[in-house]
Image: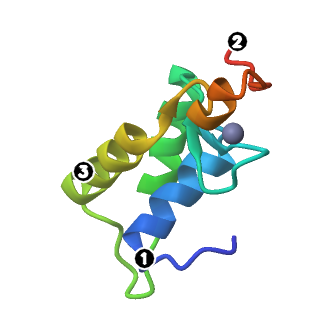
Amino acid sequence: MSVDPDDLIAVVRYALESTRATMACPFHWDVMIRVGDDAAESHAWARARNIIKSDGTKWKVEALREEFGQQLGKAADGCCPQCEHARACGVKTS
Ligand SMILES: [Zn+2]
């Protein structure tokens, strides 16, 4: 695992990306796409809940829930909006 367990934003991003609940657009690295897979999102949640900080504790549920909401809320839904404008969206949501 190559994530700083003490960095909440990094932990949540890692959990979401590694379970493919979200992915970066292959053409726009700064665009996060919410894949819309409920199973992947619960898997991501479980993964984040199991990450242990350097002081031996886990992240608080409320803090995790808030950051999950932030990152999923900011992510584009299913398809990169910049690619969509270019009519070249290659991201499959199903
Ligand atoms: Zn894109």
Q: Residue at coordinates 63% horizontally, 27% vertically from top-left?
A: 85
Q: Tell me if mark 1 has few (under 14), some (14-19) or many (20+) residues whose alpha carbon lies within 10 angstroms of its own.
A: few
Asked whether the residues under the numbered discs 1 and 2 touch, taking CB atoms below 8 Å apart as contact, a structural biologist would say: no
Query: In the image, residue 9 lies at what x, y percent?
Result: 42, 66
12 in relation to 92, above or below: below
Q: Which residue is mark 1?
A: 7
Nearest the camera: 50 or 19? 19
Task: Name the amino acid, label 1.
Answer: Asp
Q: Residue at coordinates 19% horizontally, 53% vertically from top-left?
A: 62
* Residue 56 visible in image: yes
CA distance for labels 3 and 1: 14 Å
Q: Secondary structure at mark 2?
A: loop
* Residue 21 visible in image: no
Q: Which residue is mark 2?
A: 94
Q: Tell me if mark 3 has few (under 14), some (14-19) or many (20+) residues whose alpha carbon lies within 10 angstroms of its own.
A: few
Query: In the image, residue 58 lies at what x, y percent?
Result: 36, 68
Nearest the camera: 63 or 9? 9
Horizontal side, residue 18 vs residue 88: left or right: left
